[in-house]
Image (spheres, rainbow, N blue to C red):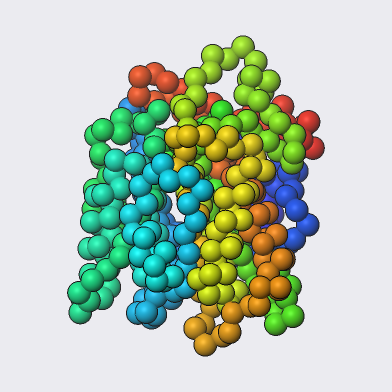
Amino acid sequence: MDNHLSASAGGRARARSLGVVVGALPTGPLNAITDVEGVLVGHTTLDDGADLHTGVTAVVPRRLATAPAGLPAAVHTGNGFGKLVGSTQIDELGVLQSPIVLTATLSVFRAADALLTYLMELHPDGLSFNPLVGETNDGFLSDIRRRPVTERHVLDALRGASGGLPAEGCVGAGTGTTALGFKAGIGTSSRRVALDGGPVTVGALVQANFSGVLTVRGVPMPVEELLPGVRHEEPPGNSCMIVVATDAPLDARRLGRLARRAIFAMGRVGAAYSHGSGDYAIAFSTAPAHLPPLPDDALNPVFAAVLDSVEEALLNSVFMATTTTGVGGRTSYGVPYDRLQGAGARP
């Protein structure tokens, strides 16, 4: 069975295993952000089975080790109710100089310091660095005030990053997150696009933690209908972090256009875009620096690839997550697959 069709341990399954296919474009071999060559993902998960459900997820572009000037990149802020350390320098210069680390809100600052340690070791002669760290608030299920993430946890995620199929659902920075009324977490997906100059790959990874009504291929799936009779409590607002990687040759301006489409994709799965939701997208290119950027009028299929890969990554983040009970006895439930047929899914 193909990796991107397989179910996870614990009986959870990705969208395509359930018959939920987003768009017509083909996926990469893993249907993951790691289908973009040289993009690695690592997780550190902190879960004590009681009050602590949190962690770290790192997206590591391998080319950063050999590209001291950094990679072209852009950040788009859908709603700025969040903490994205390092974003203003990317806005100013259009350059990504560090791996992207995701974690819980109150652990951002310790994670940024740990990422600085990593960068200083990678570039021993450097005098200034711009670590990029994003977050969502997992305080509904995790005792966020404990700030349990340490330098070791961040370094383990960075150094353990690999190019295989990343774990999804309740793992890493998604261990304690919820979205669209259900338990959520980390999700990923990819698309291949045939262009005149050759095929390119677009991959997305999300940390989903936002309100709204789960919508699968245009069909609303309210939690009250999928879990009738279950007492449901949902945290208001919260956030979503989206990372888009591509090997298409794009400059920072064009990557900004991709990042905006990534935020648009949240609407496809039912995002409420509420007051308290910090929604950010980071897009970067791993293409060799000497290649000229694609012209704007060639970007439509790349835009489609971003929209489809982010939508499917968001669905994977929910479908792969398991029911979790956390701090204060609060419970966030996994999506019941047997009630998804209305969206054309196979239970």
Whole-percent x, y for residue 201 in the image: 63, 68
Residue found at x 49% / y 56%: 76
Of the pair 60 and 179, the residue shown nearer to us: 179
Tell me: 237 left or right of 347. Answer: left
Quarter placement of the N terminus: bottom right
Residue found at x 27% / y 73%: 122
Q: What is the count of numbered marks?
A: 0
Tell me: 226 left or right of 65. Answer: right
* Residue 322 visible in the current orientation: no
Of the pair 306 and 42, the residue shown nearer to us: 306
Tell me: 52 left or right of 187. Answer: left
* Residue 57 visible in the current orientation: yes
Residue found at x 26% / y 76%: 123
Snapshot quadrant of residue 254: bottom right
Residue found at x 47% / y 38%: 277
Quarter placement of the C terminus: top right
Whole-percent x, y for residue 71 in the image: 44, 74
Q: Most extreme residue toward the bottom, as rendered?
A: 290
